[in-house]
Amino acid sequence: MTQKIIADWKPEYAATFGANQLLLHHRLSETGLFTKEALAKLIDRYPDELYNLSTMGFDPENPVWREGTISGHKGADVIDAIERGRMWLNLRRLESVDREYEKVLNEIFEEFQSYVPEFETFRRKFGVLISSPLVQVFYHADVPGQSLWQIEGEKRVYVYPNKQPYLKPKNLESIILGETEEEIPYDRAFDDDATVYDLKAGEMVHWPLNCPHRVENKDCLNISVTTEHWTNDIRKSYAVNYANGIMRRKFGVNNLSQDINSLAVYPKAALALAWRKLNLSKSDQFVRMIDFKVDPKSDIGISDVPAFAKAA
Ligand SMILES: [Fe+2]
């Protein structure tokens, strides 16, 4: 893009970038990469292993959700079915599928680094979420750094502090060890301490590492973009929590420090790496089954299929 992607950056944001939540305005729509038409064409050629289609229950305190398949339908029909139904489609790793998306992803992070020089990122990922009116994404926390960019429609985003009781160390370890997906225990009382955004097209929000969040769509189709990144500090935090998770589960150790600046980070990183290499925790990994498909002829846009395991 010739213009900046962030429309309203202010120099004073740099001092607390990553430590505070930040709402900004952006120009991602001007790339033309996230229109319904562009996304329909992208879906037509999207690799099966790089998307998730989900439908979910209605109670935010009881996170029931199911995984589905787009089942070879044309992208335009899939988007129509989402607009009528109750699901969301997450196209992951856009940057690995199409160079145009990769280029924009890199522009985003280069622009942020021009504002915040120490913000050195790697393993950047780009996703797009196409979701039905009124659907929700349950309370969860993500492992890498995250931002959410609204392209079309409107959603209510609740962001919670990344500390107890909203996020218990044991639950973060479970996500990192792959024992669960990203979901963690949620209590409606947490909402009193959430920051709530009614995120509109052209707005984006960035929050501190691992902040739990949940989302409720307004009564309209939503197209949103997610960016993920890693930094050296995020990598250290991952290693410390991974090692803490092993020590807690396999060796019964409690009162574990999450400090990433102490000398203990190095043996913990070594333990995490060794454990992953030995692959000892593979049998504890969570596997989700697919049990519905997009069905353009159905009123709700989907129909059930016999459950099968999704290829990793
Ligand atoms: Fe998330």
Image (tube, grey):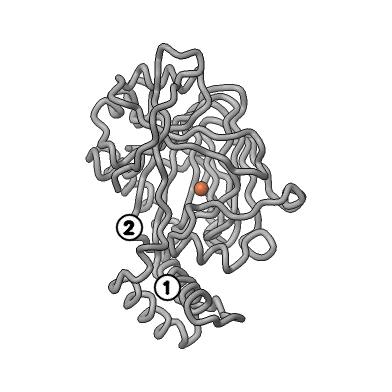
Q: Would residue 200 be seen by someone viewing this image from the given angle?
A: yes
For this view, does 231 lie left or right of residue 133? Answer: left
Q: Would residue 28 be seen by someone viewing this image from the given angle?
A: no
Within the image, what quadrant is residue 172 found in?
bottom right
Q: Is mark 2 on a helix, strand or loop?
A: strand
For the point 59% across and 80% down, which residue is it? Answer: 254
Number of other residues with Cα within 10 Å of mark 2, as a class: few under 14, some 14 to 19, many 20 or more: few
Number of other residues with Cα within 10 Å of mark 1, as a class: few under 14, some 14 to 19, many 20 or more: many
Q: Distance between the residues labelled 2 and 1?
A: 16 Å
Give the amino acid at mark 1.
Answer: Ala
Q: Is mark 1 on a helix, strand or loop?
A: helix
For this view, does 182 lie left or right of residue 284? Answer: right
For the point 57% across and 30% down, which residue is it? Answer: 135
Q: Nearer the viewer, residue 232 or 271?
A: 271
Coordinates of residue 62 in the picture (x, y in percent): 64, 43
Coordinates of residue 63 in the picture (x, y in percent): 59, 43
Tag shown at residue 119: none
Counting the numbered discs, the total is 2
Q: In this view, does 276 lie above or below 51?
A: below
Q: Name the residue under label 2.
A: 123
Q: Residue furthest bottom?
A: 263
Q: In this view, does 122 lie above or below 194?
A: below
For the point 55% across and 76% down, which residue is it? Answer: 258
For the point 30% across and 48% down, which residue is it? Answer: 312
Within the image, what quadrant is residue 218 found in?
top right
Give the amino acid at mark 2.
Answer: Arg
Q: Name the residue under label 1.
A: 239
Nearer the N terminus, badge 2 or badge 1? Answer: 2
Coordinates of residue 119 in the picture (x, y in percent): 42, 62
Q: In this view, does 162 lie above or below 55?
A: below
Coordinates of residue 85 in the picture (x, y in percent): 51, 21
